[in-house]
Image (tube, rainbow, N blue to C red):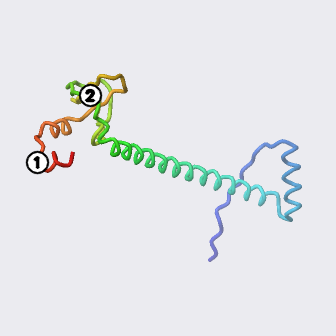
Amino acid sequence: MRHHRQERWLHARISEHLEDALKREARRKRQPVSLLVRNVLEGALDLVEDIVEDGLAVAQRSHRLARNLGRSAKAASGDGLDDVYGWQELILNRAATCARCETDLTAGASAHRGLRDQPGSPIFLCTSCVRRLRQPRTHSEEETR
């Protein structure tokens, strides 16, 4: 038994100009107008899907690149915390990110804000990273600095 495609009828109002253009193109391609319209619609939907997928891929690559560039910049200048002279514990009123380990810090969480002599955007550390600051350095770590 042959399986037929489940085809549906779709009625749409179009302008006279569009009807003329579709008929001309169908005659040029020597195919029925309905087949031309179906092919055009399928092609347009495929094109939109491809554009969306490509756009998402570009956005994801850009996000990864920006994150990697940020990490590279931090690595080049130490950890980016050289101008911080101290840390003030606080409870966040809005979400932030730990400057060292990039952990998401939620509103209501304890965090530590970096204090600087120069103005700049606020910088925060999570409790774990501050705890690591309090650990004494080993002799080999002091030699590498």
Q: Residue furthest front?
A: 143
Q: How far across and how far down the image is residue 21, in percent? A: 86, 50
Q: Which mark is on residue 81?
A: none
Q: How far across and how far down the image is residue 137, in percent? A: 12, 43
Amino acid found under the numbered disc labelled 2: Gly
User: Dot 2: what SS?
Assistant: strand
Crowdedness near tag 2: few (<14), some (14–19) or many (≥20) residues, C-alpha within 10 Å: some
Question: In this rendering, which labeled residue sits more in front, label 2 or label 1?
Answer: 1
Q: Residue at x 20, y 39 (%)?
A: 129
The earlier-in-sequence mark between 2 and 1 is 2
Question: Mark 1 sits on what residue?
Answer: 139
Q: How far across and how far down the image is residue 42, in percent? A: 68, 56
Q: Residue at x 14, y 50 (%)?
A: 140
> Which of 8 and 145 lies nearest the eye of the viewer?
145
Q: Quadrant of the N terminus?
A: bottom right
* Residue 101 quadrant: top left
* Residue 40 quadrant: bottom right
User: Dot 1: what SS?
Assistant: helix
Q: Residue at x 69, y 57 (%)?
A: 43
Amino acid found under the numbered disc labelled 1: His
Question: Mark 2 sits on what residue?
Answer: 114
